[in-house]
Image (tube, helix red, strand yellow):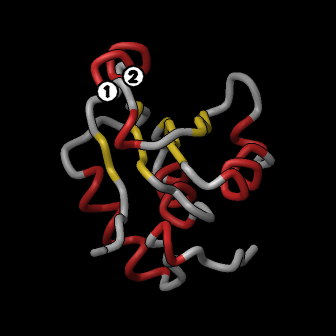
Amino acid sequence: MTLPTRKHLGQHWLHDPLVIGRIAQACTEDLVAGAPLIEIGPGEGALTRALLQRGYRVIALELDPRCVQHLQQWPEAQPGGPLQVQAGDALATDWPSLLRQTQARRVVGNLPYN
């Protein structure tokens, strides 16, 4: 699925499998497989998919309702699955509460430079 980007949200979509793999590797270095992590701004889910394939539980925090809906349709997002999708703005998130609730030890993302 390729959604039109919304420039006011600074969106850009990852497509290059080599880049996605390198980012996933860098994000999970020294992290125990199966560990929960929070991904900020998963967008269409390219990095999300790579993290799930590596065996991590992903809490995806996404602002764009189109992307939230897209990710919630993934089989991994079903109750009890390794993907939990949360609609929200990372800048307005209660991080201490979210980290306690999810027990995540790492926050990752491929955020745009703007």
Above-or-below relation of 7 to 94: below
Q: Are marks 1 and 2 in contact (CB under 8 Å)?
A: yes
Residue 56 relative to residue 44: left or right? left
Find numbered disc 2 in the image and state the secondary structure of the residue it sits on.
Answer: helix
Split into 4 quadrants, where in the image is the N terminus? bottom right
Tell me the distance, in whole angstroms, between the alpha carbons under discs 1 and 2: 5 Å
- Residue at point 69% right, 51% down? 65
Is any part of residue 83 visible from this angle?
no
Find residue 78 and report its horizontal and vertical position in percent: 76, 32
- Residue at point 32% right, 72% down? 22
Going by the numbered disc 2, the residue's amino acid type is Leu
Question: Residue 74 or 43: which is nearer the viewer?
Answer: 43
Would you name the residue on which mark 2 appears?
Answer: 98
Residue 6 relative to residue 97: left or right? right
Is any part of residue 32 visible from this angle?
yes
Find residue 98 and report its horizontal and vertical position in percent: 39, 22
Would you name the residue on which mark 1 appears?
Answer: 95
- Residue at point 41% right, 49% down? 40
